[in-house]
C-alpha cells in the first residue's frame, strides 16, 4: 500500500512539473504575441529545432538573448530585446519582429 501511494505521489509530481513547464511556454508565447501581433512566432523563433523535445530544446541566439533579458520576476524586458540583433544580420530584433521575420535566423531579414 505504501509503495502505491509513493508511486502515485511521484507520478503527480512529475505531471505537475511537466504541466508547469508547458504552461510557462504557452504563457510566454501569449505574452510575446500580445506584444508583437505581426510576428510569426513559432518554436523555431527561439529554438534550434522547429519542434523541440523537452530533453533536446536547445535555443538559438535569439532564444539565448530572450533568457538574458528575463528578469527575476519571470518577466521579459522586451525593450532591451528589441535593441539587440541576435542573429547578427544587421537588422534589430525589434524590426524583425515587426516585419514578421525570424530574429534568430540570419537568412531571414
Image (cartoon, helix red, strand yellow):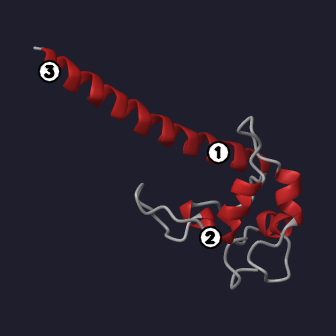
Q: Nearer the viewer, residue 57 or 28?
A: 57
Q: Residue at x 70, y 49 (%)?
A: 33
Quadrant of the frame with the C terminus: bottom right
Q: Residue at x 68, y 85 (%)?
A: 107
Q: Which residue is mark 2?
A: 60
Q: Which mark is residue 28?
A: 1
Image side of residue 103 versus residue 3, left or right: right
Q: Which mark is residue 96?
A: none
Quick one: which residue is furthest to the top in this view? 1
Quadrant of the frame with the N terminus: top left
- Secondary structure of the residue carrying tag 2 is loop
Quick one: which residue is furthest to the left in this view? 1
- Secondary structure of the residue carrying tag 1 is helix
Q: Which residue is mark 3?
A: 4
Total numbered labels: 3
Marks 2,1: beta carbons within 8 A: no
- Secondary structure of the residue carrying tag 3 is helix
Amino acid at each position: 500500500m505504501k509503495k502505491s501511494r509513493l508511486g502515485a505521489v511521484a507520478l503527480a509530481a512529475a505531471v505537475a512539473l511537466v504541466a508547469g513547464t508547458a504552461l510557462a511556454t504557452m504563457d510566454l508565447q501569449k505574452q510575446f504575441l500580445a506584444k508583437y501581433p505581426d510576428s510569426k512566432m513559432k518554436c523555431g523563433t527561439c529554438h534550434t529545432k522547429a519542434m523541440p523535445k523537452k530533453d533536446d530544446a536547445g535555443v538559438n541566439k535569439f532564444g539565448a538573448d530572450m533568457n538574458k533579458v528575463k528578469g527575476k520576476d519571470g518577466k521579459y524586458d522586451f525593450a532591451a530585446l528589441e535593441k539587440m540583433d541576435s542573429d547578427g544580420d544587421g537588422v534589430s530584433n525589434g524590426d524583425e519582429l515587426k516585419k514578421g521575420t525570424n530574429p534568430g535566423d540570419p537568412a531571414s531579414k
